[in-house]
Image: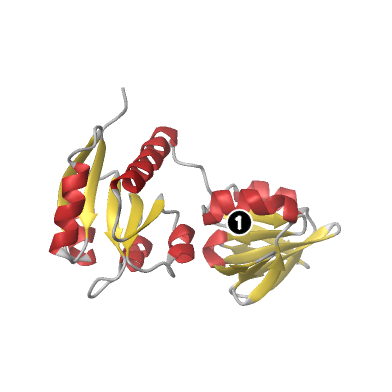
Amino acid sequence: MMDLLTCLIVDDEPLAVEGMRFYLEQIDGVTVVGHCYSALEARKKIKETSVDLIFLDINMPGISGLELLECLENPPMAILTTAYSEYALEGYRLDIVDYLLKPIALPRLLRAIEKAQGKKCQIGPPEQTINELYIKHEDCYVRVEPKEILFVEAMQNYVRIHTTKGTYVSHQTLSAISERLGNKSFYQIHKSFLVNTACIDSVKGNRVVVYGQELPLSKHRKEDFFKKIVNI
């Protein structure tokens, strides 16, 4: 038997809220635990209530839906509901389940719900990650936090670690540092490049732009990249 999926609707349009509630109440395995008309209200509700999934509008007064996801320490799964398609890549950077364009058809909503139910079943123990690591750079060890790393570049028997604070050279392999990071936020887009997916600005064909720098996306990694990271 499938676990019950608890849902919260977040939208500043009352008609949109009522329409979504009407749909969700007809779907087995789903229960609506409430609705909010602003991101600030939703932030409080999520802290007080157990929520598996939020249906989240993007354009709302005060704080947008995307800004809400960024400020939550442990956000629930999210399905974005919006009339604007230009935020799709930004939404998937935040690991959303799906992106629904208004007006939302029931069959499309059902597919999104199935994705969320599947993802909930796959969620296991929290992935073990490190909060910091020390990189041997020249004659000393430099403390680096993974979130500060933009991308790592392989250079034969050493790597260049590009961070928000500077670039460090370390004598180790790309696979070794990837294993040390042990964090799903990092993805190897090319045999020579490991990127922090949270720092991706955009994707242009076979190029990934990270913090203003264009990096190559391997042809044989492109399909997996779009499936796992861009999710389209």
Nearer to us in this view, 84 or 4: 84
Please indicate, yes or no, whether residue 49 appears anywhere in the rendered image. Answer: no
Nearer to us in this view, 76 or 60: 60
Residue 25 at x, y percent in the picture: 17, 41
Residue situated furthest top in the rendering: 1
Q: Residues within 10 Å of mark 1 (few under 14, many from 20)?
A: some
Q: Which residue is mark 1?
A: 133
> Does residue 53 appear left or right of residue 94 in this picture?
left
Residue 58 at x, y percent in the picture: 31, 66
> Does residue 8 appear left or right of residue 119 in this picture?
left
Residue at image x 42%, y 39%?
Answer: 119
Residue situated furthest right in the rendering: 156
> Does residue 108 appear left or right of residue 145 in this picture?
left
Residue 174 at x, y percent in the picture: 74, 54
- Which amino acid type corresponds to the residue marked 1 in the rendered image? Leu
Residue at image x 17%, y 65%?
Answer: 13
Q: Which image quarter: residue 197?
A: bottom right
Residue 67 at x, y percent in the picture: 34, 68
What colour scheme was applied to this rendering of the protein?
A: secondary structure
Element carrying mark 1: strand
Please indicate, yes or no, whether residue 126 appears anywhere in the rendered image. Answer: yes
Q: Quadrant of the N terminus?
A: top left
Residue at image x 19%, y 60%?
Answer: 16
Residue situated furthest bottom in the rendering: 212
> Does residue 7 appear left or right of residue 226 in this picture?
left
Q: Is residue 97 above or below residue 86?
A: above
Residue at image x 66%, y 66%?
Answer: 205
